[in-house]
Image (cartoon, rainbow, N blue to C red):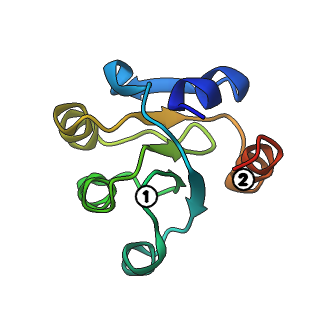
């Protein structure tokens, strides 16, 4: 599955990284405690988090996540969007809360 697939099926808004939505997604992870994500996330994950500061982008880059999904139309810091664009990490925004997003990703096979 590609990032593009979840953008279309979950009606997500691409905040940055539109040129990188053809990345493969092999799983999903949701957590807001950054140290926990660093020790439990896996390469190719779509990461669902309410965190919007630049450290999120650094962790996504370190773990080679396919994208970051921000729930509930939370506004993302401009510096985070700029860093993610520069590093090729799509940041996507959803209307739904994290619980609903994770359920939808599960239904899609992630």
Of pointers 2 and 1, the one earlier in the residue sequence: 1
Position of 15 compared to 50: left or right?
A: left
Kindly report the distance in space between the C-alpha atoms of the residues bearing marks 2 and 1: 16 Å
Q: Residue at position x 49%, y 34% from top?
A: 92
Disc 2 secondary structure class: helix
Residue beneath disc 2: 102
Position of 95 compared to 108: left or right?
A: left
Q: Residues within 10 Å of mark 2 (few under 14, many from 20)?
A: some
Position of 36 compared to 101: left or right?
A: left
**Rendered view: 102 above or below 80:** below
Q: Quadrant of residue 39?
A: bottom left
Disc 1 secondary structure class: loop
Q: Foreground mark, 2 or 1?
A: 2
x, y (%) of residue 2?
A: 54, 31
**Location of the N terminus (image quadrant):** top right
Q: Which mark is residue 96?
A: none
The residue lying toward the viewer, choosing from 26 and 91, is 26
Q: Quadrant of residue 17?
A: top left
Q: Residues within 10 Å of mark 1 (few under 14, many from 20)?
A: many
The residue lying toward the viewer, choosing from 64 and 82, is 64
x, y (%) of residue 43?
A: 41, 58
Q: Residue at position x 46%, y 24% from top?
A: 14
Residue beneath disc 1: 51
x, y (%) of residue 52?
A: 38, 51
């Amino acid at each position: 599955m590609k990032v593009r697939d979840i953008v279309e099926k979950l009606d997500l808004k691409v905040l940055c990284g539109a040129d990188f939505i053809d990345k493969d997604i092999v799983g999903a992870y949701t957590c807001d405690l950054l140290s926990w994500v660093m020790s439990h996330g896996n390469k190719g994950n779509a990461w669902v988090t309410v965190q919007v500061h630049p450290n999120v982008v650094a962790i996504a880059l370190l773990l080679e996540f396919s994208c970051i999904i921000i729930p509930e139309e939370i506004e993302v810091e401009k510096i985070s969007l700029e860093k993610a664009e520069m590093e090729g990490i799509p940041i996507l925004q959803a209307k739904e809360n994290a619980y609903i997003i994770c359920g939808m990703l599960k239904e899609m096979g992630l």
